[in-house]
Image: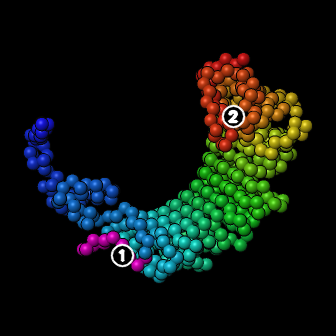
Amino acid sequence: MARTPRKRRRRRRPGGGGGGGHDYLSGLPDDVILAILSRLTTRQAVTLSALSRRFRVLPSQFGRVDSALVADPALPLPSLPARPSFIRRLSFAPQTRRFSSSAFGRLLDAAADRGLSELAVRLPRSSFLPQNLLSIRSLTVVSLDSCALPRWCPAACPGLRTLKLHHVAIPQRMISVILKAAPVLETLEMVYCMGFAGSCSMESSTVRNLLFKSALEQREVTVKMAGLRTITLYTRPKVQSVRLDPAPEIRKAYLHIARPRVKLQFRIRPFLDAGTGLTCLTLRGMAIKLLSSEYKDTPNLAVQFEDLRILSVSLDFSNERELIFLLKLLESCPNLQQLTLSAVDAKDDTALPNFADHEERFSKLSCLTKSLEQLKFLGFRPQRYQKELFIFLLTQATNLKKMAVEFPKDQEAAVRRILSVRKAPTQKKTTKYKQYYLELEYPVEPNCS
C-alpha cells in the first residue's frame, strides 16, 4: 500500500500576518485607507482590494477613476452613491454608428463636472462630434480618430497641451480657432485630416512638436510655428506647395516630400538656415532634390550645424546637383556622428557622375576624420560612383565603430569584396529591409588597410 503523504504544518512567524500578529493596515479607519489609496492608480487600488475581505468594498468607495472606456453614451459614468468620482481619462468608442450625439454631449458634460483631463474618441465612419467637445476647460489631452468636427463649434481649452487628429474631417476655420484657443498647446498631430478645401495652414507660437501627414486632396501646406523643436512632415503627390517658416529652436526635423505630379513650389531654405541648433535631420523622398535647387547658386551653406549629430538623406547618385548639395551639407556638419545614405532611382554607370570630381571635397570633410562613428548605406548597388564613395568612406572614417549596408541578394559577393578593404571582427547578416542587410562592428581604434 502506498503511504499517504504527511501534511506539513505551516509555521507562523511571531508578530507576522496570518493571525499571528497585529494587522496595522486593516485596523486603520476607512478615511485613512482611502487617503492612502488616492495616491495610487486605479489598477493598484483594485489589486489591493484582493488582500482581505474588508478591502473588497474599497474600489466602490474610491474617489478617483483613472480611466473609463464607454461604448454607449447612454450608460452612466462610474460614480459613488454619495458623491461622484473624479475621472482623469475618458475613452469613447461605440461599436456601431447608431448612437445619439445628444447623449454623447450629456456624457461629456458629466465628465467635465468630474475633472476630465484626457479624452480619446474614435467614431465609426466619420460621425460628427457634439459641439461642446472643445468647451471642456479642464482638458489637457485630446485624441480624435475617424470622426468629424462641426463647421463651427466654440473652443475654450486654456489647458490643452496635446491635440491628436487622425483621419478627422475638420475645416480650416476650426483649425485656426483651436490653435488660438489653446495658448499652451505643445504637441499637435494631424494625420490624413480632411476638409481643408485644397490647402492647410497652421499658425501657432506655442507648438513645440508637430506631426503632419497630408490627405489626398490637399494641394498646399503652410507651417508658421516659430517655437517648433521637432517636426515630422509627410506630403502626398498632389501637394503643389510646401512652405515652412523659420523656427530658430528646431532640434529634430523629418521631411518626406513625395514626388509631385506637377511642379512643386518648395520653400524651405529659410527654415534650414534658421535651424542652427539641429541635432537630427532626415531628408526623404524629393526633399534633397528640391533643396539642391534652392541652394544651386551658393557654393557653401551660410550656416554651420555645430550640434547636428544624426544625418539621414535619400538621394539619386546619378544627379550631380544632389551630390553637390550633400557635400555642402556635410561641410556644414563638423561634429556629425551618424550618417545614413539611401540610394534611390539608381541608373546605369554611364549616367553616373565621376567620383574623382568630388573626391577632393570629400577628403576635406572634418567629420570623417574626427567625429563620424556610424555609417549606414541603404539600397547600395556596386555601381561606379557608389562603390568608390563607399570605399572612400570606409578608409577615411578613422573613428568608425559601426557600419551597415543593405543590398540585393545577388550582389553579396561584390559587397564583400568592397568591405574587405577594412577588416571587421564582428559581422552579422540579416534580412532587414526585405533585402540582405549586413552589419559590421570595428574596434575603437581600427587599423585601416
In reply to whether residue 81 is colored magenta, the answer given is yes
Residue bearing the label numbered 1:
76
- Most prominent secondary structure in the magenta stretch? loop
What is the magenta range? 73-84
Residues packed near mark 1 inside 10 Å, few (<14), some (14 to 19) or many (20 plus): few
Dividing the picture into quadrants, the one containing residue 138 is: bottom left
Question: In the image shown, does 174 or 356 lie closer to the viewer?
Answer: 356
Percent coordinates x, y for residue 152 in the rendering:
59, 79
Name the residue rendered at 86%, 29% in the picture: 356
Colour scheme of the picture: rainbow
Residue type, mark 2 in image: Val
Q: Residue at x 36, y 72 (%)?
A: 77
Q: Quadrant of the image for the C terminus?
A: top right
Q: Is residue 339 visible?
A: no
Q: Residue at x 71, y 65 (%)?
A: 216
Q: Where is mark 2, residue-wise?
A: 405
